[in-house]
Image: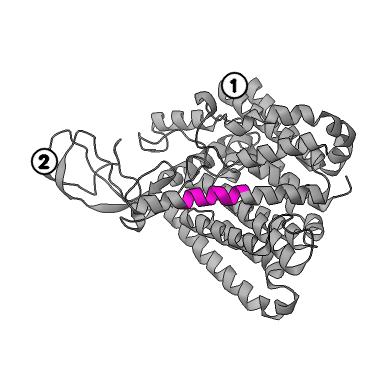
Protein backbone atom coordinates (compact mmCIF):
# COMPACT_ATOMS: atom_id res chain seq x y z
CA UNK A 1 0.00 0.00 0.00
CA UNK A 2 1.37 3.39 -1.00
CA UNK A 3 1.97 6.10 1.59
CA UNK A 4 -0.66 8.35 0.00
CA UNK A 5 -3.31 5.62 0.10
CA UNK A 6 -2.41 4.81 3.70
CA UNK A 7 -2.92 8.45 4.70
CA UNK A 8 -6.24 8.57 2.86
CA UNK A 9 -7.48 5.53 4.81
CA UNK A 10 -6.25 7.11 8.04
CA UNK A 11 -8.29 10.24 7.31
CA UNK A 12 -11.33 8.11 6.45
CA UNK A 13 -11.08 6.14 9.70
CA UNK A 14 -10.60 9.30 11.78
CA UNK A 15 -13.68 10.96 10.23
CA UNK A 16 -15.86 7.87 10.61
CA UNK A 17 -17.29 8.71 14.08
CA UNK A 18 -18.24 12.29 13.15
CA UNK A 19 -21.68 11.85 11.64
CA UNK A 20 -23.80 14.21 13.71
CA UNK A 21 -24.30 16.66 10.85
CA UNK A 22 -25.03 16.05 7.18
CA UNK A 23 -22.63 17.57 4.66
CA UNK A 24 -24.23 20.74 3.24
CA UNK A 25 -27.57 19.52 4.60
CA UNK A 26 -27.72 16.58 2.14
CA UNK A 27 -29.38 13.68 3.93
CA UNK A 28 -27.15 10.63 4.61
CA UNK A 29 -24.07 12.34 3.13
CA UNK A 30 -21.50 12.86 5.87
CA UNK A 31 -18.04 14.46 5.86
CA UNK A 32 -16.42 11.01 5.72
CA UNK A 33 -18.09 10.40 2.34
CA UNK A 34 -16.00 13.17 0.81
CA UNK A 35 -12.91 11.01 1.33
CA UNK A 36 -14.42 8.01 -0.46
CA UNK A 37 -13.78 9.30 -4.02
CA UNK A 38 -10.17 10.04 -3.04
CA UNK A 39 -9.70 6.49 -1.71
CA UNK A 40 -11.37 5.13 -4.84
CA UNK A 41 -8.94 6.93 -7.17
CA UNK A 42 -5.83 6.13 -5.10
CA UNK A 43 -6.83 2.45 -4.85
CA UNK A 44 -7.07 1.92 -8.62
CA UNK A 45 -3.61 0.34 -9.00
CA UNK A 46 -3.83 -1.97 -5.98
CA UNK A 47 -7.38 -3.01 -6.85
CA UNK A 48 -6.24 -3.87 -10.38
CA UNK A 49 -3.56 -6.19 -8.95
CA UNK A 50 -5.56 -7.86 -6.19
CA UNK A 51 -9.25 -7.72 -7.10
CA UNK A 52 -9.38 -11.07 -8.89
CA UNK A 53 -7.83 -12.88 -5.91
CA UNK A 54 -10.09 -11.10 -3.42
CA UNK A 55 -13.22 -11.91 -5.42
CA UNK A 56 -12.29 -15.60 -5.52
CA UNK A 57 -11.70 -15.68 -1.76
CA UNK A 58 -14.65 -13.46 -0.82
CA UNK A 59 -17.17 -14.75 -3.33
CA UNK A 60 -20.08 -14.76 -0.81
CA UNK A 61 -19.84 -10.94 -0.58
CA UNK A 62 -20.30 -10.73 -4.35
CA UNK A 63 -23.15 -13.27 -4.14
CA UNK A 64 -24.86 -11.09 -1.52
CA UNK A 65 -24.68 -8.05 -3.80
CA UNK A 66 -25.88 -10.10 -6.78
CA UNK A 67 -28.95 -11.33 -4.89
CA UNK A 68 -29.65 -7.77 -3.74
CA UNK A 69 -29.54 -6.46 -7.32
CA UNK A 70 -31.79 -9.27 -8.56
CA UNK A 71 -34.36 -8.39 -5.89
CA UNK A 72 -34.14 -4.71 -6.83
CA UNK A 73 -34.61 -5.51 -10.54
CA UNK A 74 -37.66 -7.64 -9.76
CA UNK A 75 -39.12 -4.78 -7.71
CA UNK A 76 -38.68 -2.37 -10.64
CA UNK A 77 -40.39 -4.80 -13.03
CA UNK A 78 -43.23 -5.39 -10.58
CA UNK A 79 -43.88 -1.89 -9.21
CA UNK A 80 -41.84 0.53 -11.27
CA UNK A 81 -38.89 2.74 -10.40
CA UNK A 82 -38.81 4.83 -7.22
CA UNK A 83 -36.38 7.17 -5.53
CA UNK A 84 -36.25 5.11 -2.32
CA UNK A 85 -35.28 1.98 -4.26
CA UNK A 86 -32.57 3.86 -6.18
CA UNK A 87 -31.16 5.24 -2.92
CA UNK A 88 -31.12 1.79 -1.31
CA UNK A 89 -29.36 0.23 -4.31
CA UNK A 90 -26.79 3.05 -4.54
CA UNK A 91 -26.04 2.75 -0.82
CA UNK A 92 -25.55 -1.01 -0.99
CA UNK A 93 -23.30 -0.81 -4.06
CA UNK A 94 -21.20 1.88 -2.34
CA UNK A 95 -20.84 -0.21 0.82
CA UNK A 96 -19.73 -3.31 -1.08
CA UNK A 97 -17.28 -1.12 -3.03
CA UNK A 98 -15.98 0.21 0.30
CA UNK A 99 -15.49 -3.38 1.46
CA UNK A 100 -13.55 -4.31 -1.68
CA UNK A 101 -11.38 -1.18 -1.58
CA UNK A 102 -10.42 -1.80 2.04
CA UNK A 103 -9.94 -5.53 1.42
CA UNK A 104 -7.62 -4.94 -1.52
CA UNK A 105 -5.80 -1.90 -0.15
CA UNK A 106 -5.11 -3.07 3.40
CA UNK A 107 -4.05 -6.67 2.95
CA UNK A 108 -0.88 -6.99 5.09
CA UNK A 109 -1.44 -7.66 8.78
CA UNK A 110 1.04 -5.00 9.91
CA UNK A 111 -0.67 -2.27 7.84
CA UNK A 112 -4.05 -3.44 9.11
CA UNK A 113 -2.89 -3.43 12.75
CA UNK A 114 -1.61 0.13 12.37
CA UNK A 115 -4.88 1.27 10.86
CA UNK A 116 -6.89 -0.46 13.59
CA UNK A 117 -4.74 1.25 16.23
CA UNK A 118 -5.67 4.64 14.72
CA UNK A 119 -9.30 3.46 14.67
CA UNK A 120 -9.11 2.64 18.40
CA UNK A 121 -7.63 6.08 19.14
CA UNK A 122 -10.30 7.93 17.10
CA UNK A 123 -13.08 5.87 18.67
CA UNK A 124 -11.73 6.58 22.17
CA UNK A 125 -11.74 10.32 21.42
CA UNK A 126 -15.36 10.08 20.26
CA UNK A 127 -16.23 8.17 23.47
CA UNK A 128 -14.67 10.90 25.62
CA UNK A 129 -16.67 13.59 23.81
CA UNK A 130 -19.88 11.63 24.39
CA UNK A 131 -19.08 10.99 28.05
CA UNK A 132 -18.42 14.71 28.48
CA UNK A 133 -21.85 15.47 26.98
CA UNK A 134 -23.50 13.08 29.45
CA UNK A 135 -21.67 14.78 32.32
CA UNK A 136 -22.88 18.18 31.10
CA UNK A 137 -26.44 16.86 30.90
CA UNK A 138 -26.30 15.63 34.49
CA UNK A 139 -25.10 19.11 35.48
CA UNK A 140 -28.09 20.67 33.70
CA UNK A 141 -26.44 21.65 30.41
CA UNK A 142 -28.13 19.98 27.46
CA UNK A 143 -26.27 19.31 24.19
CA UNK A 144 -27.11 17.39 20.97
CA UNK A 145 -24.55 14.78 22.03
CA UNK A 146 -26.64 13.36 24.89
CA UNK A 147 -30.36 12.76 25.38
CA UNK A 148 -32.41 12.92 28.56
CA UNK A 149 -33.59 9.42 29.50
CA UNK A 150 -36.42 9.80 32.06
CA UNK A 151 -37.13 6.06 32.14
CA UNK A 152 -34.28 5.70 34.63
CA UNK A 153 -35.00 8.87 36.59
CA UNK A 154 -34.71 12.64 36.18
CA UNK A 155 -30.89 12.61 36.23
CA UNK A 156 -30.36 9.90 33.60
CA UNK A 157 -28.89 10.77 30.19
CA UNK A 158 -28.22 8.58 27.15
CA UNK A 159 -25.00 8.99 25.22
CA UNK A 160 -25.30 9.84 21.52
CA UNK A 161 -21.93 11.47 20.88
CA UNK A 162 -20.78 12.57 17.46
CA UNK A 163 -21.54 9.24 15.79
CA UNK A 164 -25.11 9.80 14.64
CA UNK A 165 -28.60 10.75 15.67
CA UNK A 166 -29.49 7.96 18.08
CA UNK A 167 -27.96 5.98 20.97
CA UNK A 168 -28.13 2.82 18.84
CA UNK A 169 -25.89 4.42 16.21
CA UNK A 170 -23.45 5.37 18.96
CA UNK A 171 -23.52 1.83 20.31
CA UNK A 172 -22.98 0.39 16.83
CA UNK A 173 -19.75 2.35 16.36
CA UNK A 174 -18.39 2.04 19.92
CA UNK A 175 -19.01 -1.72 19.83
CA UNK A 176 -16.32 -1.97 17.15
CA UNK A 177 -13.96 0.39 18.96
CA UNK A 178 -14.32 -1.65 22.17
CA UNK A 179 -13.38 -4.97 20.59
CA UNK A 180 -10.59 -3.47 18.46
CA UNK A 181 -9.08 -1.84 21.57
CA UNK A 182 -9.56 -5.08 23.51
CA UNK A 183 -7.84 -7.14 20.81
CA UNK A 184 -4.89 -4.73 20.61
CA UNK A 185 -4.55 -4.68 24.41
CA UNK A 186 -4.62 -8.48 24.63
CA UNK A 187 -1.99 -8.65 21.90
CA UNK A 188 0.26 -6.40 23.99
CA UNK A 189 -0.52 -8.28 27.21
CA UNK A 190 0.15 -11.74 25.83
CA UNK A 191 2.78 -10.66 23.28
CA UNK A 192 0.73 -12.51 20.67
CA UNK A 193 0.32 -10.66 17.39
CA UNK A 194 1.23 -7.05 16.68
CA UNK A 195 -0.85 -5.45 19.45
CA UNK A 196 -1.23 -1.69 19.52
CA UNK A 197 1.57 -0.48 17.26
CA UNK A 198 2.15 2.92 18.85
CA UNK A 199 -0.08 2.78 21.94
CA UNK A 200 1.16 1.37 25.24
CA UNK A 201 -0.61 -1.38 27.12
CA UNK A 202 -1.91 1.04 29.75
CA UNK A 203 -3.30 3.41 27.13
CA UNK A 204 -5.05 0.52 25.38
CA UNK A 205 -6.52 -0.71 28.68
CA UNK A 206 -7.79 2.81 29.36
CA UNK A 207 -9.34 2.83 25.87
CA UNK A 208 -11.16 -0.44 26.66
CA UNK A 209 -12.55 0.97 29.92
CA UNK A 210 -13.62 4.27 28.28
CA UNK A 211 -15.44 2.31 25.57
CA UNK A 212 -17.14 0.13 28.19
CA UNK A 213 -18.44 3.22 30.01
CA UNK A 214 -19.68 4.78 26.76
CA UNK A 215 -21.43 1.57 25.70
CA UNK A 216 -23.23 1.23 29.01
CA UNK A 217 -24.41 4.85 28.91
CA UNK A 218 -26.04 4.39 25.52
CA UNK A 219 -28.61 2.12 27.28
CA UNK A 220 -28.90 0.43 23.89
CA UNK A 221 -30.48 -2.87 22.99
CA UNK A 222 -27.07 -3.74 21.57
CA UNK A 223 -25.71 -4.49 25.04
CA UNK A 224 -26.82 -8.08 24.48
CA UNK A 225 -24.41 -8.12 21.52
CA UNK A 226 -21.63 -6.87 23.80
CA UNK A 227 -22.24 -9.79 26.17
CA UNK A 228 -22.24 -12.30 23.31
CA UNK A 229 -18.97 -10.85 22.01
CA UNK A 230 -17.39 -11.14 25.46
CA UNK A 231 -18.47 -14.79 25.64
CA UNK A 232 -16.82 -15.48 22.27
CA UNK A 233 -13.67 -13.59 23.30
CA UNK A 234 -13.53 -15.21 26.75
CA UNK A 235 -10.68 -17.67 25.91
CA UNK A 236 -8.47 -14.81 24.75
CA UNK A 237 -9.43 -12.74 27.80
CA UNK A 238 -8.68 -15.59 30.21
CA UNK A 239 -5.29 -16.42 28.76
CA UNK A 240 -3.62 -19.80 29.03
CA UNK A 241 -3.09 -19.55 32.79
CA UNK A 242 -6.78 -19.15 33.66
CA UNK A 243 -8.50 -21.46 31.17
CA UNK A 244 -9.60 -23.79 34.00
CA UNK A 245 -11.79 -20.97 35.38
CA UNK A 246 -13.37 -20.23 32.02
CA UNK A 247 -16.41 -22.54 32.19
CA UNK A 248 -18.16 -20.94 35.21
CA UNK A 249 -17.48 -17.47 33.80
CA UNK A 250 -19.03 -18.39 30.45
CA UNK A 251 -22.04 -19.98 32.15
CA UNK A 252 -22.58 -16.79 34.17
CA UNK A 253 -22.27 -14.60 31.06
CA UNK A 254 -24.72 -16.80 29.15
CA UNK A 255 -27.24 -16.57 32.00
CA UNK A 256 -26.96 -12.78 32.12
CA UNK A 257 -27.23 -12.62 28.32
CA UNK A 258 -30.42 -14.70 28.25
CA UNK A 259 -32.04 -12.61 31.00
CA UNK A 260 -31.03 -9.31 29.39
CA UNK A 261 -32.19 -10.45 25.96
CA UNK A 262 -35.56 -11.58 27.33
CA UNK A 263 -36.02 -8.30 29.19
CA UNK A 264 -35.02 -6.11 26.24
CA UNK A 265 -37.21 -8.13 23.86
CA UNK A 266 -40.26 -7.45 26.03
CA UNK A 267 -39.33 -3.89 27.00
CA UNK A 268 -38.67 -2.68 23.47
CA UNK A 269 -41.60 -4.52 21.93
CA UNK A 270 -44.09 -3.63 24.65
CA UNK A 271 -43.96 -0.62 26.92
CA UNK A 272 -46.28 0.92 29.48
CA UNK A 273 -47.98 3.77 27.64
CA UNK A 274 -50.66 6.18 28.78
CA UNK A 275 -53.76 6.52 26.66
CA UNK A 276 -55.16 10.03 26.70
CA UNK A 277 -57.20 12.51 24.73
CA UNK A 278 -55.25 15.68 23.83
CA UNK A 279 -56.89 19.03 24.50
CA UNK A 280 -56.03 22.59 23.48
CA UNK A 281 -57.75 24.06 26.53
CA UNK A 282 -55.74 24.81 29.63
CA UNK A 283 -57.02 23.06 32.74
CA UNK A 284 -56.08 22.44 36.34
CA UNK A 285 -56.10 18.70 35.73
CA UNK A 286 -56.75 16.16 33.05
CA UNK A 287 -57.91 12.67 33.92
CA UNK A 288 -57.01 10.07 31.30
CA UNK A 289 -59.17 7.07 30.59
CA UNK A 290 -57.14 3.88 29.98
CA UNK A 291 -60.03 2.46 27.94
CA UNK A 292 -59.79 5.17 25.25
CA UNK A 293 -58.29 4.50 21.87
CA UNK A 294 -54.63 5.16 21.07
CA UNK A 295 -54.95 8.56 19.37
CA UNK A 296 -52.67 10.56 17.11
CA UNK A 297 -50.97 12.29 20.03
CA UNK A 298 -49.75 9.60 22.36
CA UNK A 299 -47.08 8.87 24.94
CA UNK A 300 -43.71 7.32 24.21
CA UNK A 301 -42.00 5.11 26.80
CA UNK A 302 -43.59 6.51 29.95
CA UNK A 303 -43.20 10.16 28.87
CA UNK A 304 -46.40 12.02 28.01
CA UNK A 305 -45.97 14.30 25.00
CA UNK A 306 -48.92 16.67 25.28
CA UNK A 307 -50.11 19.24 22.79
CA UNK A 308 -47.75 22.24 22.69
CA UNK A 309 -50.54 24.71 23.52
CA UNK A 310 -51.84 22.77 26.51
CA UNK A 311 -50.69 23.91 29.97
CA UNK A 312 -51.51 21.52 32.78
CA UNK A 313 -50.56 22.10 36.40
CA UNK A 314 -51.63 18.63 37.50
CA UNK A 315 -52.03 15.45 35.47
CA UNK A 316 -53.84 12.30 36.60
CA UNK A 317 -53.65 9.43 34.17
CA UNK A 318 -54.36 5.75 33.87
CA UNK A 319 -51.74 3.47 32.31
CA UNK A 320 -52.17 0.31 30.34
CA UNK A 321 -49.92 -2.18 28.51
CA UNK A 322 -49.46 -1.26 24.84
CA UNK A 323 -47.18 -2.28 21.97
CA UNK A 324 -44.47 0.31 21.33
CA UNK A 325 -43.37 1.61 17.96
CA UNK A 326 -40.95 -1.31 17.61
CA UNK A 327 -43.73 -3.80 18.22
CA UNK A 328 -45.82 -2.22 15.46
CA UNK A 329 -42.84 -2.25 13.07
CA UNK A 330 -42.16 -5.94 13.71
CA UNK A 331 -45.85 -6.79 13.23
CA UNK A 332 -45.95 -4.84 9.95
CA UNK A 333 -42.68 -6.44 8.76
CA UNK A 334 -44.07 -9.93 9.30
CA UNK A 335 -47.30 -8.98 7.52
CA UNK A 336 -45.39 -7.61 4.52
CA UNK A 337 -43.17 -10.70 4.34
CA UNK A 338 -46.11 -13.10 4.38
CA UNK A 339 -47.66 -11.17 1.50
CA UNK A 340 -44.39 -11.06 -0.54
CA UNK A 341 -42.50 -14.09 0.72
CA UNK A 342 -40.32 -14.78 -2.33
CA UNK A 343 -38.67 -11.45 -3.27
CA UNK A 344 -40.19 -8.99 -0.80
CA UNK A 345 -41.47 -5.53 -1.70
CA UNK A 346 -38.06 -4.30 -2.87
CA UNK A 347 -35.09 -2.56 -1.20
CA UNK A 348 -36.01 0.67 0.53
CA UNK A 349 -39.74 0.31 -0.09
CA UNK A 350 -40.91 -0.87 3.32
CA UNK A 351 -41.67 2.68 4.59
CA UNK A 352 -43.99 3.28 1.60
CA UNK A 353 -45.84 0.02 2.25
CA UNK A 354 -46.01 0.76 5.98
CA UNK A 355 -47.56 4.18 5.30
CA UNK A 356 -50.26 2.56 3.15
CA UNK A 357 -51.00 -0.05 5.82
CA UNK A 358 -51.20 2.65 8.49
CA UNK A 359 -53.51 4.92 6.49
CA UNK A 360 -55.79 2.07 5.43
CA UNK A 361 -56.24 0.86 9.01
CA UNK A 362 -55.68 -2.73 7.89
CA UNK A 363 -53.45 -3.68 10.82
CA UNK A 364 -54.84 -1.21 13.34
CA UNK A 365 -51.62 0.79 13.41
CA UNK A 366 -51.77 4.10 15.33
CA UNK A 367 -52.22 7.14 13.05
CA UNK A 368 -49.11 8.82 14.44
CA UNK A 369 -46.80 5.89 13.66
CA UNK A 370 -43.91 7.19 11.48
CA UNK A 371 -43.12 5.40 8.23
CA UNK A 372 -39.73 3.95 9.19
CA UNK A 373 -37.57 0.99 8.24
CA UNK A 374 -38.26 -2.24 10.17
CA UNK A 375 -35.53 -1.54 12.79
CA UNK A 376 -34.32 -5.11 12.39
CA UNK A 377 -31.71 -6.40 9.96
CA UNK A 378 -33.38 -9.77 9.57
CA UNK A 379 -37.02 -8.67 9.52
CA UNK A 380 -35.99 -5.94 7.08
CA UNK A 381 -34.36 -8.52 4.82
CA UNK A 382 -37.52 -10.65 4.90
CA UNK A 383 -39.91 -7.74 4.28
CA UNK A 384 -37.90 -6.04 1.52
CA UNK A 385 -36.15 -9.08 0.03
CA UNK A 386 -38.28 -12.08 0.97
CA UNK A 387 -36.63 -15.47 1.36
CA UNK A 388 -34.12 -14.54 -1.34
CA UNK A 389 -32.93 -11.49 0.61
CA UNK A 390 -32.73 -13.47 3.84
CA UNK A 391 -30.72 -16.16 2.04
CA UNK A 392 -28.25 -13.54 0.77
CA UNK A 393 -27.82 -12.23 4.30
CA UNK A 394 -27.36 -15.76 5.65
CA UNK A 395 -24.67 -16.51 3.05
CA UNK A 396 -22.79 -13.33 3.99
CA UNK A 397 -22.85 -14.01 7.74
CA UNK A 398 -21.94 -17.68 7.25
CA UNK A 399 -18.89 -16.54 5.28
CA UNK A 400 -17.92 -14.18 8.13
CA UNK A 401 -18.81 -16.38 11.12
CA UNK A 402 -18.72 -19.95 9.83
CA UNK A 403 -16.31 -22.64 11.16
CA UNK A 404 -13.64 -21.85 8.57
CA UNK A 405 -13.50 -18.16 9.47
CA UNK A 406 -13.60 -18.95 13.19
CA UNK A 407 -10.66 -21.33 12.87
CA UNK A 408 -8.55 -18.77 11.01
CA UNK A 409 -9.48 -15.72 13.06
CA UNK A 410 -9.17 -17.18 16.56
CA UNK A 411 -5.47 -17.97 16.26
CA UNK A 412 -4.47 -14.69 17.97
CA UNK A 413 -6.12 -12.14 20.32
CA UNK A 414 -6.87 -9.43 17.74
CA UNK A 415 -8.40 -11.89 15.29
CA UNK A 416 -10.46 -13.41 18.12
CA UNK A 417 -11.80 -9.98 19.06
CA UNK A 418 -12.67 -9.17 15.45
CA UNK A 419 -14.63 -12.41 15.28
CA UNK A 420 -16.29 -11.68 18.65
CA UNK A 421 -17.25 -8.21 17.42
CA UNK A 422 -18.97 -9.66 14.36
CA UNK A 423 -20.76 -12.27 16.48
CA UNK A 424 -22.08 -9.50 18.71
CA UNK A 425 -23.31 -7.60 15.67
CA UNK A 426 -25.33 -10.64 14.66
CA UNK A 427 -27.36 -10.26 17.86
CA UNK A 428 -27.41 -6.45 17.61
CA UNK A 429 -28.96 -6.84 14.15
CA UNK A 430 -32.09 -8.41 15.61
CA UNK A 431 -33.22 -4.97 16.82
CA UNK A 432 -31.39 -2.54 14.51
CA UNK A 433 -30.78 -2.39 10.76
CA UNK A 434 -26.97 -2.64 10.77
CA UNK A 435 -26.28 -3.29 7.08
CA UNK A 436 -26.14 0.44 6.29
CA UNK A 437 -23.35 1.12 8.80
CA UNK A 438 -20.13 2.02 6.95
CA UNK A 439 -18.01 0.85 9.85
CA UNK A 440 -19.57 -2.62 9.80
CA UNK A 441 -18.46 -3.16 6.20
CA UNK A 442 -14.95 -2.00 7.11
CA UNK A 443 -14.97 -4.43 10.04
CA UNK A 444 -16.03 -7.28 7.74
CA UNK A 445 -13.21 -6.39 5.34
CA UNK A 446 -10.72 -6.19 8.23
CA UNK A 447 -11.78 -9.62 9.52
CA UNK A 448 -11.50 -11.14 6.04
CA UNK A 449 -8.06 -9.56 5.49
CA UNK A 450 -6.83 -10.71 8.92
CA UNK A 451 -7.90 -14.29 8.21
CA UNK A 452 -6.27 -14.29 4.75
CA UNK A 453 -3.08 -12.21 5.01
CA UNK A 454 -1.54 -13.71 1.86
CA UNK A 455 -3.67 -11.71 -0.65
Q: Is disc 1 surrounded by few (<14), some (14 to 19) or many (20+) residues within 10 Å? A: few
Q: Residue furthest bottom?
A: 244
Marking on residue 79 = 1
User: Could you tell me if residue 173 is visible in this image?
Assistant: yes
Magenta residue span: 122-131
Left or right of 198: which side holds 297?
A: left
In this rendering, would 357 be left or right of 138?
right
Q: Position of residue 168 (x, y in %)?
A: 51, 47
Q: Main secondary structure of the magenta part?
A: helix
Residue 99 appears in the picture as rendered: no
Label at residue 335: none
- At 73% from the left and 37% from the top, the residue drawn is 7
> Considering depth in this image, is 388 or 393 the residue closer to the camera?
393
Q: Is residue 225 above or below residue 359?
A: below
* Residue furthest to the top: 80
Residue hosting label 2 = 283
Residue at (64%, 28%) from the top-left corner? 34
Percent x, y of residue 322: 35, 50
**Residue with the most extreme left position:** 284
Residue 173 in the image: state x and y as whole percent: 58, 47
Do the residues bearing badges 1 and 2 touch, measured as CB atoms within 8 Å?
Answer: no
Separation of residues labelled 1 and 2 (CA atoms): 51 Å
Q: Would residue 81 be found to the left or right of residue 61 on screen? A: left
Amino acid sequence: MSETLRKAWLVYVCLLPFNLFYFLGIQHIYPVDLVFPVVLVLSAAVVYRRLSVVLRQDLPVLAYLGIFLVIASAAVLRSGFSGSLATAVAAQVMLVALYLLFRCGVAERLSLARLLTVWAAASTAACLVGLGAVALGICGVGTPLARWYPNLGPGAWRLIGTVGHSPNNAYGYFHLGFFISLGLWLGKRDEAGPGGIFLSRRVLLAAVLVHAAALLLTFSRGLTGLLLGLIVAAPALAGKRHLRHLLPVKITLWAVLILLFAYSAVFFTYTTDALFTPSRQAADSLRLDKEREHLRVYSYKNVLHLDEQARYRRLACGFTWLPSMHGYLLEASLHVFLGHWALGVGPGRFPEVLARLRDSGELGLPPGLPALRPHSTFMGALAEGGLAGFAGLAVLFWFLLGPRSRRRLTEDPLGTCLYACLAGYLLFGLNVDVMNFRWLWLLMAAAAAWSKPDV
